[in-house]
Amino acid sequence: MRSLKSAILSAAFALGLAGAAQASEAVHIPKQEWSHSGVFGTIDKASAQRGFQIFKEVCATCHSAKLVPIRTLAGIGFNEDELKAIASGYEVQAGPNDAGEMFMRPGIPADRFPSPFPNDNAARAANNGALPPDLSLMAKARVGGEDYLYAFLTGFEENPPEGVTLMPGMNYNKYFPGHQVGMPNILMPDGVTYADGTPSTVQQQAHDISTFLTFIAEPHMDARKQMGVKVILFLIVLAGLMYATKRKLWSTLH
């Protein structure tokens, strides 16, 4: 029994070392420039709107954003009429009605983005057994945030490096851990036509959808930063007033 326990512990230790070694082989993610970086940075609303177009036309065929209300898009410049028009383009399950049955209705801005599949099993069946992750918090769920998203979306290569054998149904991505991913390369040159005339290169599309995913993951980021700046300015003024008060009160004791 003792030898069996020792063997199990040794195997667990070896697996732990293997896991640590694999984790240490982290892929370097190139840094990108983002308008929202830094204390004073803000979301590029035009870029985020273009990113929403990519999400709607490309990503939403497989991925959901079920934690995000449609009215959140007001934060990147969509007005009330535009929000209603966007929401009405979705069918949302509602009910039950007087007969106790569920029914479908056009969406309203208060609804969340519906999933493209009725359930996880249907999603797996349509994607060779893989479950496409929800994108609501993807910018926060991956180390590197938007830098990783951009790298991943631009990191697909048609042919893997020499010596690398892809498993059936897998695609090579130089920035994905393990480099083999079930998701295909979905961004193509001029794959979408931007309404504002921006050239839709793969790099531009990756930048825009990464900006959009950053926004929906933290839609109040701009307001939070503005409040933080105001608080810091207030504390600086308060510190100055406290110091002046201290000097005044203690001046008669010197």
Image: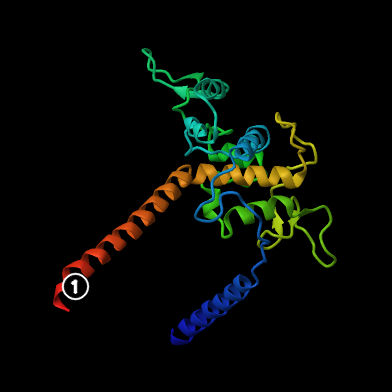
Residue 150 locus on image (x, y percent): 67, 52
Which residue was labeled with disc 1? Answer: 251
**Residue situated furthest left in the rendering:** 253
Residue drawn at x 26%, y 64% as measured from the top left: 244
> Element type at marker 1?
helix
**Relative to 17, residue 88 above or below:** above
Q: Nearer the viewer, residue 137 or 4?
A: 137
Residue drawn at x 65%, y 54% as measured from the top left: 33
Quadrant location, the C terminus: bottom left
Crowdedness near tag 1: few (<14), some (14–19) or many (≥20) residues, C-alpha within 10 Å: few
Q: From where the camera sits, is residue 136 visible?
A: no
Q: Nearer the viewer, residue 233 or 73?
A: 233
Q: Nearer the viewer, residue 26 or 44?
A: 44
Residue 53 locus on image (x, y percent): 65, 33
Rendering quarter of residue 45: top right
Residue drawn at x 54%, y 50% as measured from the top left: 41
Q: From where the camera sits, is residue 228 visible?
A: yes
Visual colour scheme: rainbow
The three-letter code of the residue at mark 1 reads: Ser
